[in-house]
Each structure stands twice: as C-alpha cells, then as structure tokens.
Amino acid sequence: MTKNNPPACLIYSNMTKVKWLWSIAIAMGIVLLYASLSAYFIKIDGWYNGLILPSIALSPKGMAIGWSLAYIVNIAIIARLIFHRKHTMIILPLVILGVLNILWCMVFFTIHSTIASFVILIIACALIFAIFVMTIRRDTIAMILLEPLFAWYVYLAIVNYYIFINN
C-alpha cells in the first residue's frame, strides 16, 4: 500500500455507505410519494366528525404518529431490499401496498364508503401477510419489520369495520 492509495477495505466501506444512502433515498422517495398522495385525500370534515368511533380509535395526532411509524417501517424494509438486491421482487408488493394506501384514503375520506375502505384494508392485510411469507426464509430482518406493519393495518381494519357497522 502506497501513501496515495487507500486500502481496499476502506474503498469497499465507502462504497457500501454510498449504496446504503442510495437505497434509503430511493426508499424514501417511493414511500414519500404515496404518503403525500394519501395525505391529499385526507379531509377531517363534518362527515368524519359525525362518525361513531370505537373506544380504541386514536385521536388525529395518534393516527399521524401511527402512520409516520408505518411509513418509517416501509422505508426501512424497501431500503433493505434495495441494498441487498437479492429479493427486489418483494418491493413490488410493497409498492402495491402504497397504492392501496392511496385508494383507502380516497375511498374513506373523499367518497365516504366505509365498506369499500374496509375491503381495501382487508386486501392490504392479506398483501402484508403474503409479503411476510415471502420474506420468511429470505430476509429475517424485513420479516420482523413487517410484524408491526401488519398489526397497524389489522388495527385500522378493526376500527374501519366498527365504523362501517355503527354508522
């Protein structure tokens, strides 16, 4: 090793850091795109304020925190899958989950269809479970990260079902 040439391990380390940063940036772009489009349809108006909500329903601030955590988990999973590149086919179902997110916000908050929004959440839960199964032997960390995401969507489905039944 000469004075002007860094050791190979430092070059690899720097390349790995850059690859992680790009993976995170791409994942953030994907998730922020569908999070922004979802937020566009959310309108807390007279219709929503008139709904009978279950006792387990979070306040708007609580929902914002829940969604923020769900988006962070999505970013972590997608970034991990992009970085490792072995299982990038799992990214497509996660993007479809984002599209379902947008649809749910549109159907629930704009169209005010509680039954259609419940069906969308059931499809989202099934999709997350399928992604979970896809990651069982491929990526343990991604699989573990999917568990709170699945719990969040089940919670949303339960609240949505209660709203459908009682309104």
Image (cartoon, grey):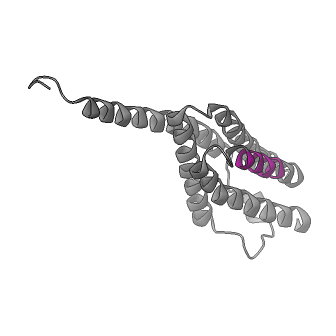
Residue 60 or residue 150, whichever sits in front: 150
Estimate the x, y position of residue 138 in percent, counting from the top left. 64, 43
Please count the marks in the image: 0
Q: Quadrant of the C terminus?
A: bottom right
Query: Residue shown at 81%/70% (left/top)?
Result: 52
* 135 with respect to 115 (left or right): left
Residue 1 or residue 103, whichever sits in front: 1
Is 35 placed above or below 18 here? below
Estimate the x, y position of residue 140 in percent, counting from the top left. 60, 51
Q: Residue 151's image quarter? A: bottom right
Residue 132 on the magenta segment: yes
Estimate the x, y position of residue 66 in percent, counting from the top left. 60, 60
Q: Quadrant of the N terminus?
A: top left
Query: Residue shown at 56%/61% (left/top)?
Result: 65
* 154 with respect to 31 (left or right): right
* 101 with respect to 18 (left or right): right
Query: Residue shown at 53%/37% (left/top)?
Result: 27
Residue 110 or residue 81, whichever sits in front: 81
Q: Residue 157's image quarter? A: bottom right
Query: For the magenta stretch, what is the residue range?
Result: 120-133
Is 12 placed above or below 52 here? above
Residue 12 on the magenta segment: no
Q: Main secondary structure of the magenta part?
A: helix
Residue 69 is at least partly visible in this image: yes
* 101 with respect to 157 (left or right): left
Query: Residue shown at 60%/54% (left/top)?
Result: 145
Residue 29 is at least partly visible in this image: no
Which residue appears farthest toward the bottom when viewing the image?
55
Estimate the x, y position of residue 54 in percent, counting from the top left. 78, 73
Which residue appears farthest toward the front when viewing the image?
1
